[in-house]
Structures are given as structure tokens and as C-alpha cells.
Image: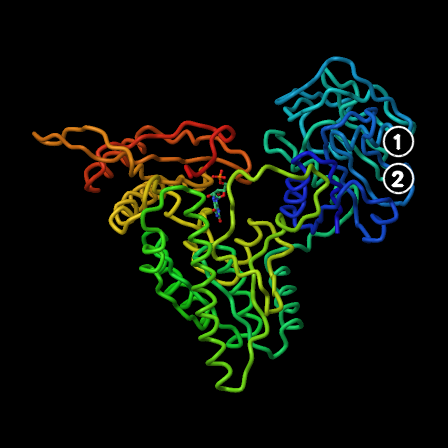
Amino acid sequence: PVLVVDYGAQYAQLIARRVREANVYSEIVPHTYTTEQLLAKNPAAIILSGGPSSVYAEGAPNVGADLFEAGIPVLGICYGFQAMAAALGGTVAETGSREYGATDVTLVGESRSILASTPAAQTTWMSHGDSVQSAPEGFDVLASSAGAPVAAFANEEKCLFGVQWHPEVKHSEFGQKVLENFLFNGAKLEKNWTATSILDEQVDRIKAQIGDAKVICGLSGGVDSAVAAALVQRAVGDQLTCVFVNHGLLRAGEAEQVELDFVASTGAKLYVANEQDRFLNALGGVSDPETKRKIIGREFIRAFEEAERAIMAEAASEGEEIKFLVQGTLYPDVVESGGGEGAANIKSHHNVGGLPEDLRFELVEPLRALFKDEVRAVGAELGLPPEIVGRQPFPGPGLGIRIVGEITGERLELLRKADAIARAELTAAGLDNEVWQMPVVLLADVRSVGVMGDGRTYGHPIVLRPVSSEDAMTADWSRLPYDLLAKISNRITNEVEGVNRVVLDVTSKPPGTIEWE
Ligand code: XMP
């Protein structure tokens, strides 16, 4: 693999994703790894990420100079670049000229090395206080900026490179080119990480793990569980039974997507538990968001276990036993991060569609090495329909946390209609890819006065919350065209009885969260 050493900023995952987008497998390791531990992973190349420290600060993570003697191609980025410069005898200093955000960089000499095929002047994304003042011996300066006399350097002979800016961030115009120059010209790697190769490798692994045993998999309606199930189905066919607990909190058409489209495109065996009433009853009278989440999580586990028992009983009657349970864990959930720990628990994001803790089963986790975009690519490769593969993130507790106030069957119906209109118009405008997700929220406890025809109305507002984001950790409100907003507003107020206002949420995250509850 290409190892991305995480110095504790939020950039390591992005770097790993960009490397994989270039069709090269990459993994993240914490900066606490020693050179020996790094080399034990047999890296094809190493990328040192950015981080929040100053290389001279007390306790700053450092890079052992021995890493640069191991004959492995290394690219240092931002903090990694400075740490590399310092380790090899260059000078790094705080000059007081911080650069933050879009920054112009000028190439020194012709366009070459990791900056090959990029223009003499380019915009990059910077975030640094210290800067490299002089490059270590044997290194060529490739670029500089107003605040960084050495903004990029290379030692071709030893295959060591560095950039002060963040090539992994989209705001760096030629960032991906820089990474690819490093991977393919510098480190001379091959492109062999593709949807097909991932699929083949995972199918082989699953076969080896499961053998001829029986396995079950919960489907939530989301991308991850669908792709995980489809992979297992591809590997072991009818040894797999999928379980779909319909909690009645999905959006319009989503249960059908599982029950019809998923089954049609995979041929998987499906057990459906229709539990809409059970969830509505359990949620009666509750408006506190965290209580809602707890109830939904608890009922989900109970319903899933009941389904599980029914399936096990059937298997037992044929002398079979179920040994494995599929889980759609993704790479970002398992990555060993060098970043800070103890992030505040802002919402209890237990994943409904996630599963009981008491594991009588051995886990099968076919997505454990994958980022979300890779899951989608594998899903498409498996022939899952675009509506499933391209689905935007949707919270496990579903519409249950998009009704501010008590959940009732009528309110769910109303919200489903409004949400279906908003989604259809967004799709018709061709803007699905512009937004990360667009929660549509019913303010069930708020009413306002309106006028329709000759009459006064007293109805509920619907909130549109379209956001753009890379990972849901931070987000900005999407600047949707006014015409589109007008159309959505018009249709919702006309077609959804009980709604007389549509409002737009223009809060970024932080301070807002994406969902309202
Ligand atoms: P927030 O609202 O915290 O949401 O900005 C971040 C992302 O998480 C999703 N979300 C949830 N997902 N169970 C889930 O599985 C939950 O309880 C939950 N709450 C929020 C949200 O849709 C967004 O993608």
C-alpha cells in the first residue's frame, strides 16, 4: 500500500481518498508508528500528512531521518513537508507570514518533477505558520510563494518530495496532478485499484471466510448495507438471507427499492418484517430527539432479533445453522487515527440498520477497507440500480428525526410528500451531485398564519436543508438556484395539505448540525 502517515489534522483521510481515486491502494497509519513499524507494512510509497503542530514545538511528532534512507519514495505535505525538511538538515522557521486559504505559488525554473505539467503560476490551498527557509542538501526548490521561499522541493535521486500546500484539497487547482506525478513518475506505481479489482478481491475473501455456512444481513435501505449484501450474495449466493425491518420512517419509495429493486438486481433472498405500527406505538407522545433515537434503536434491535430467530428456526428445521452476520462497516470507522480523541458526543449516531451488540455470530465486513465513493463504485459494478448506489446519506432513525415534535402517522405522510417533491425537483434540475444531502424537515410544533384563495390558513412550515460537504463533519448550505427553490416551495405549499410555508436553512455546520434533531 501507499501509507498515509496521519499527523493529526483532518487531511489524512482526504489524502488516502485522492490516492485511491488515482487507482492506487492506500492506508492510513498514525504518526506514532516507528520507522520499523512503517516498513513492516511493506509500503510502496509513503505520504506524510499535514498536522496542526509546529515542528519545533515541544512534543511535536517528528519523523525519524532513517525513514528517508530506506529507499521508499516519500512525499511530505504541509507539516510532513516541514518535518522532512527539518529531519534532513533544512531550516524551518516561523517568519510571521502565515498563509491560510487560497495562495498563489510560482514555479522556480521549468515545470518538472512532481510539478510536471502544471502551470508556472497556480493557486494552491495553504494552511501554515512556519515555513521552510532553505531546502536540505541535495534538494531542488521547485516552487515558492510570498510566505514560503521553499514551497515545494524534490530530491529525484532519493525519490523524496515535498509541498507546503495541500494537494488533496480541491481548492488546490493542480493538486491531483501533483499527487499523480508523485505516484506514477516519482514512485513508479501501477494503477491497479479499481472497482473490478476490489470486487474480485472481496468476493474471494468472503468465500474464504464463509465457506459453505449460512449468513444473514440486515438491509437498511442505505447504500452500505445494500452493497455489502450484494457482495456477499455474489460470493455465496443463497447461503445469504437478507433481513429488512421496515420501521415506517423511510422516505417515499425507499421500502420498495429494497423489496423490489434490490431483490431484482441481486437475486438475494429477502425476509421482510413490517413493523411500522410497532415503531409508531413506541414513539407515541415522544418529542425529545435523543429519546426518539433511543426508542428507534431499541425497537430496531428487538425487531431484528425476532426476524433473526424466525430465520434461524427455519434453518434449524433443515438441519442448518447460521454462523455469520454481515455488517457494512466502512474504512473511516476503523481507521486508526493520529488525530485527537474524545470528540464530544453531540448526537448519539447509532446506526439503525446497525446491529445488536451481543454477537452470537461471526462478523463479515466486506466494506471495511473502503471509502464511501468506493462502495458506490463497487455497487454499480455489481449491477445495483443508480437510485440505490447514488443515494445520499440518510440517517438510520430516518424521518423520525426530521419531524420536530411528536411523530404521528399523518405527519409522516405529510413529510413524505414534501420530501418527495423536493427530491424530485432537485433531481430534475440536475443538481443531485451538487448537494451532499438535503434533509426536508417538518416543524410539527410550529404553526403560522397564511392565506390561500379567500381563506386564512394556519399550517406548518417545511424547512429545506440542502448542504454541501465532503464528509458530514463540516458542511455549508448549498446555494441552490432561486428558480429551483421557488418551484419546490410552490409545489409543496400547493400539493401538501397542512403546509403553508417553505423556509430555507442558511446555516453552516458548525454551528448548525446537518439534521435538525
Ligand atoms: P449531523 O446532524 O450530526 O449529521 O450534522 C451528520 C450526518 O449524520 C447523519 N445522522 C445520522 N445517521 N443515525 C445515523 O445513522 C443518526 O442518528 C444520525 N443523525 C444524523 C446525518 O444525516 C448526516 O449525514
Q: Specify which label sits upstream in the sequence, 2 or 1.
A: 2
Q: Dividing the image into 4 quarters, which one contains the C terminus?
A: top left
Check disc 1: other Cα within 10 Å, few if <14, some if 14-19, many if 20+. some
Is label 2 in a helix, a strand or a loop? helix
Identified at 23% across, 29% down, the residue is 448
Q: With 273 as the anchor, is 415 left or right in this view?
A: left
Q: Which mark is residue 206?
A: none
Q: Amino acid at mark 1?
A: Ala
Residue 46, compared with residue 163, is above or below; it is below
Q: Which mark is residue 87?
A: 1
Q: Give residue 143's position: percent from left, percent from top.
A: 76, 24
Is label 1 in a helix, a strand or a loop? helix
Identified at 42% across, 42% down, the residue is 289
CA gap, disc 2 and disc 1: 9 Å
Residue 352, compared with residue 312, is above or below; it is above
Q: With 383 as the anchor, is 77 left or right in this view?
A: right
Q: With 280 as the anchor, is 85 left or right in this view?
A: right
**Depth order, front residue of 301/323:** 301
Q: Amino acid at mark 2?
A: Phe
Circles 2 and 1: CB atoms closer than 8 Å:
yes
- Residue that mark 2 sits on: 68
Q: Give residue 505's position: percent from left, percent from top.
A: 38, 30
Q: Give residue 136's position: percent from left, percent from top.
A: 89, 27
Q: Give residue 91's position: percent from left, percent from top.
A: 87, 22
